Image: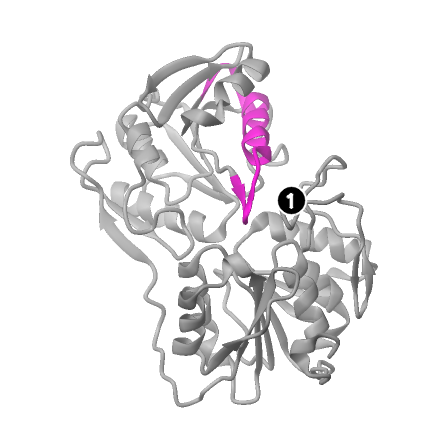
Amino acid sequence: MNPESTAAATPFTTPWGAFHLTRHPEDPRERLRAWDAADDYLLRHLAGEADSAAGAATELAGRRIAVLGDRWGALTTALAPYEPVQITDSHLGRLATRANLARAGAAVDEARLLTTRDTPPERIDVLLVRVPKSLALLEDQLHRLASAVHPGTVVIGAGMVTEIHTSTLELFEKILGPTRTSLAVRKARLILCTPDPALAPGPSPWPHRYALPTDIGPAAGRTVVNHAGTFCAERLDIGTRFFLSHLPTPAPGDRVVDLGCGNGVVGTAAALAGPGAELVFVDESYQAVASAEETFRAGLGPDAPAEFLTADALDPAVFAPGSVDLVLNNPPFHSHQATTDATAWRMFTGARRALRPGGELWVVGNRHLGYHVKLRRLFGNCRLVAGNPKFVVLRAVKR
């Protein structure tokens, strides 16, 4: 069984109380928890209740605490009395944190909720890190936080054993200082790091840039900008490459949404193919939206009009019904380490609501995911535009 999989109503019992936590968006049918064994292990270590702590609790009162990569706010909610600063790349995680703090009776201002694009704290006395799926994002954020830690800073990372590799430890060691790991408990492990003031890791090496291939249509040869954590930061992924070869051409005045935009290459290609179209780039990752904006500006110039939104898919508070002509979508099928189609389903249903009658949703996906079944169920139609042994491009029309 997936270590995150359980009934959503199961309370998260910590040394600071029991909390009913949910992911965002909340769904009573959700079987993926908003916390896992790594969150539990880290908090018990802080309280001196884990074997790894050797009986010594970490003093938290009066200390400046930063929580990096808290996935759904489990750590921030448990430690709310100490007013931690949360730093996250996930808009959904941030919304979940707000809801979980409120449910726990904690004022949201008890925890400063920062994004990975915000200026980090100037001083950190306790740094707690939930190891992200992206090693690049970890590298970038450790570089950004390195100047805030000091020899007395307590640095503790946490993750499931499948998330912590030699390369993970090497990043902590290279950027912050000597690093060791704990024993594994319930398939979770801690990273214990002692900051070394003699280290001079320098600035973050991110973002990365590369030129697109010359055989992919209107965006051929254009520069792609990738901030750390953005999907396929080193080269164009094969699914997007296939999509770029089969994109529709927007008409002047069409409102086109690059949904789950990542580095923005799909929306940029659509803008180049259809001058006069109104482009909107949407992602739940702050790093992705920053990447998309820089990619678009590199391709169309600093003054080209477009919108760049960090949002929960086609949030009805942002996209009115019937306000969109074309949605381009390469949906993810992972939420952290869990495989799920919930995000794709939410994107598809949101697209149907936001599209005008006659508006179109174009989707690229792995052939085995069977997106055509979902699209036919939602739209009443779905046409195969193109396919190869691995990917399909599908088109659904709002009737």
- Is 112 placed left or right of 240 in the picture? right
Residue interval drawn in magenta? 334-361
**397 vs 108: above or below:** above
- Amino acid under disc 1: Met
| Image x and y of residue 381, in percent | 50, 10
Which is nearer the eye, 287 or 367?
367
Is 31 situated left or right of 338 in this image?
right
Q: Name the residue at the left extreme.
A: 214
The vertical placement of 218 against 379, above or below, is: below
Q: Is residue 346 magenta?
A: yes
Determine whether, in the image, residue 256 is placed left or right of residue 67.
left
Image spot of residue 67 (x, y percent): 61, 68
**Crowding near pointer 1: few (<14 within 10 Å), some, many (20+)?**
few
Residue on which disc 1 sits:
1
Based on the displayed image, in which of its 4 quarters is residue 350 positioned? top right
Q: How is the image coloured?
A: one colour
In the image, what residue occupies the spot 73% across and 83% down?
55
Residue displayed at 45% across by 74% down: 172
